[in-house]
Image (tube, rainbow, N blue to C red):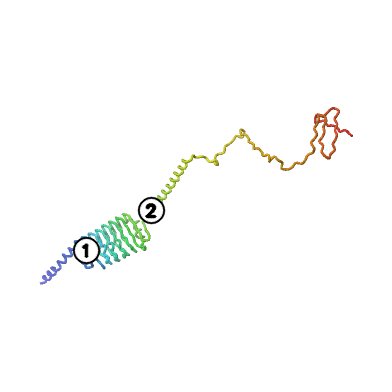
Amino acid sequence: MLLLPSLLLLATSWPVVIADSDSCSSSATISSQSDADTYANCDQIDGSVTISSSASGSIILNNVTEIKGSFTAEGASGLTTLAAPDLETLEGALTVDSMSSLSNLSMNSLSEVSSGITIIANPKLKHLEFEDLEEVDGQLKLTGSFSSVSLPSLDQVKGQTTIRGGRSMSCTALNNLQSEDVYHGGYSCSTSSGSSLSTGAKAGIAIGVIVGVLLILFLMWWVFRQRRVRQKRRRPSQTPASISPPVLKDEKQSTPQYQPIPSSDLSPKVPRKPVGLAPALLDGRSIYEAAYPASPIPVYHELDAGPVFSTHQRPINSES
């Protein structure tokens, strides 16, 4: 008698088990929370999960720890909350794009994504946090008006990492991961008011600026040099007279050159004192001294020996 109720219970539950098994082995499209609840008994979904663009309100996918395909939510303008609290492994890509009303995205148990993560164009999504995310085999692209982005457990990103948030977002913690060799495919983090580049990127920019300045200086020197060469070709080079070396002359061979003195310079500057009357001419036998005005004229006579022919002879005055 007890066997009969057990058989009846098994018969009624068997179709449900079959239905759950079928839903876990294929891809899923979720439009509402009731659709998400049909996968509550699935630890693993063998296909991809797609959130319909007609979905609205909140959708929480419970108990699913692994998805063999991708997880995609695009264009669901009425969806405000999307969560997969137990999801740990995603073998495809994670895409959350153009969700104009989405303000809460929660996948805190997610640790590995075999493809890339793209979360873009969700204007009301201000805080983004993946507490357990360790490895992303593809690109990591997070752009929006985020106030904060937290990836505390991130260990490796094999593709390009691009993170851009709002003005209040800080890139400091994300930049620190650069020194730990987390970003293998390149990294940039920026905000709406500026950018925060990695140390390697800043060093590259600095080197580029230095090389550019040196190149400009070289071009300026080359243009100046070419201009001087053209100027020298247009006119023969001449040594200026002002800097010509002095010519040394031999004083013995040099002939002095005299300049004529103007006649006006010969005129006396100071008048001479008047002199007396011109002395009388000597006749060869008598010698007279020049007479001056207002003085008596002495009379001299010749000696008996003859006329005076030299200066050692003196005439003798005769007495009157």
Few, some or many residues within 10 Å of mark 1 (<14, 14–19, 20+): few
Q: Is residue 14 left or right of residue 291?
A: left
Determine the CA span between mark 2 and mark 1.
47 Å
User: 140 and 40: which one is in front?
Assistant: 140
Q: Residue 85 occupies which quadrant of the picture?
A: bottom left
Farthest residue to the bottom: give it: 1
User: 182 and 19: which one is in front?
Assistant: 19
Quadrant holding the C terminus: top right
**At which x and y percent is residue 277?**
80, 37
**At which x and y percent is residue 37?**
21, 67
Q: Is the residue 135 above or below the residue 228 in the image?
A: below
User: 140 and 90: which one is in front?
Assistant: 140
Few, some or many residues within 10 Å of mark 2 (<14, 14–19, 20+): few
Residue located 86% across and 31% down the image: 301
Pointer 2 or 1: first along the chain: 1
Instruction: Assign a secondary structure to mark 1.
Output: strand
Q: Is residue 93 left or right of residue 270?
A: left
Give the labeled residue for mark 1.
29
Q: Which amino acid, by three-letter code, is at mark 1? A: Thr
Q: Is the residue 227 above or below the residue 102 in the image?
A: above
- What label sits on residue 317 in the rendered view? none
Instruction: Assign a secondary structure to mark 2.
Output: helix
Q: Which amino acid, by three-letter code, is at mark 2? A: Ile
Farthest residue to the left: give it: 1
User: 274 and 196: which one is in front?
Assistant: 274
Give the labeled residue for mark 2.
205
**At which x and y percent is residue 281?**
80, 32
